[in-house]
Amino acid sequence: MKLLVVGSGGREHALAWKLAQSPRVQLVYVAPGNGGTAHDERLLNIDITEPAALADFAEREQIAFTLVGPEGPLAAGIVNLFRSRGLKIFGPSKEAAQLESSKDFAKAFMKRHAIPTAEYETFTEPGAAHAYLDAKGAPIVVKADGLAAGKGVVVAQTLEEAHAAVDMMLSGNKLGDAGARVVIEEFLTGEEASFIVMVDGKHVLALASSQDHKRLLDGDLGPNTGGMGAYSPAPIVTPQLHARVMREIILPTVRGMEKEGIRFTGFLYAGLMIDAQGNPKTLEFNCRMGDPETQPIMARLKGDFSKVVEQAIAGTLDTVELDWDRRTALGVVLAAHNYPETPRKGDRISDIPAATEESVTFHAGTTLVDGKLLTSGGRVLCVVGLADSVRSAQSVAYETINQISFDGMQYRRDIGYRALNRKH
Ligand code: AMP
Ligand code: GLY
């Protein structure tokens, strides 16, 4: 069996790595992939990104199924295209991907279906948006409606920042179409967690819980990033909270989409804010796996993932049970000089320790040029450690990192700190 994974990040490396472990899988193509997927002998990069060309490739190579990593191609309709050509693919249609690609769609959907989320209003007129900000006061959150590659959310501590965000998006047109509409929402406090499930249109299969670290610096300081590290499981997601999130957020979302005639298939990622009393609210939906959450999650998943995806495509996820490594997996992102602003490219990366039972390193912004591994993006590597406790998994990850270097390498030293500080 030959498979295709679309994307080039750490998430896609981890997905392809896991799929390639199946004895049924001969080869996993990664389009376009990175330096890590280029290096792994069971993976093969192909330099194609255009959806129609990917469909031609899948047809020609008799790809058993395609798995899509990032939101861009999903929002552009790659699933619609593949399905119209009779090609097997796992992900949401363009219509279903609106849960991520339009914040206004997601918020209005949650309101219709009484799914817990922050109070909000949507605006296209700067005047009305500014007046709403003045009426509500700070802190307050301003979000571009469309996909903005992580740049579309401003958590404003002051009204000044909030007004500036509205000016930047609505009047300044700095985010283009994505910012032509803004959602202004209530500021929520609490602890965040990533709740990711697989959906086949009807049935839901929850993946192991995880938690990301979105800020650049230790102690959750500095600018927001795509994610500087993640671990699984996340102790804040107790069995009780898990049941509640399924009942109050995930199932109403899947049923609601079905009722509205937009069946959701694919990975559904609810970004949660859990308040001090343990009540979860939905911060956002993503219609894909998280990055870097995928890396520790895939490191813990046992069994044949290719079979799970096949069942998901066939609509029989209700027959699947996942088996997880009981250990904690903890992944630390090594980022390039000047990430997240304008990451430098082209730095030579030292040799990377081979994977063991306790550690594995996934590539993201790397490229292999004449046998040399160079940085080529903001988040360069994600080093995952596996051990019986969060503390030990952290030690394994950081010991591995001590063997890796490149100019300008930056990373957080405190990944997993929330789990370590938790009172039991
Ligand atoms: P989003 O892309 O909507 O998840 O927003 C990115 C980040 O902004 C989240 O991970 C949170 O840290 C923060 N954020 C988003 N919405 C809110 C909110 N309503 N209250 C507080 N923080 C938020
Ligand atoms: N790690 C956050 C995300 O994938 O959106």
Image: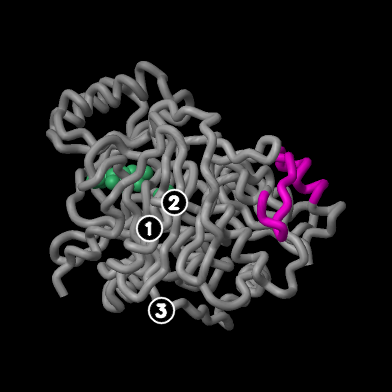
Q: Which residues are magenta?
A: 39-57
Asked if 27 appears above or below 122 in the picture, the reply is below
Q: Nearer the viewer, mark 1 or mark 3?
A: 1
Query: What is the C-alpha distance between the residues marked 2 and 3?
Result: 26 Å
Mark 3 residue crowding within 10 angstroms, few (<14) / some (14–19) / many (20+): some
Residue 214 is covered by the magenta coloring: no
Mark 2 residue crowding within 10 angstroms, few (<14) / some (14–19) / many (20+): few
* Residue picked out by circle 3: 326
Contact check, label 2 and label 3, Cβ < 8 Å:
no
Q: Position of residue 408 (x, y in %)?
A: 40, 33
Asked if 367 appears above or below 315 in the picture, the reply is above
For ligand 1, give the image quadrant: top left
- Under circle 2, the secondary element is loop
* Residue picked out by circle 2: 403
Contact check, label 1 and label 2, Cβ < 8 Å:
yes
Q: Position of residue 106 (x, y in %)?
A: 41, 49
> With 133 as the anchor, is 86 left or right in this view?
right
State the image quarter where residue 279 is shown: bottom left
* Residue picked out by circle 1: 399
Judge by depth and name the residue closer to the eye, 309 or 317: 309
Judge by depth and name the residue closer to the eye, 281 or 238: 238
Please say whether residue 59 is visible from this viewpoint: yes
Query: What is the C-alpha distance between the residues marked 1 and 3?
Result: 21 Å
Residue located 77% across and 66% down the image: 26
- Under circle 3, the secondary element is loop
> With 422 as the anchor, is 254 left or right in this view?
right
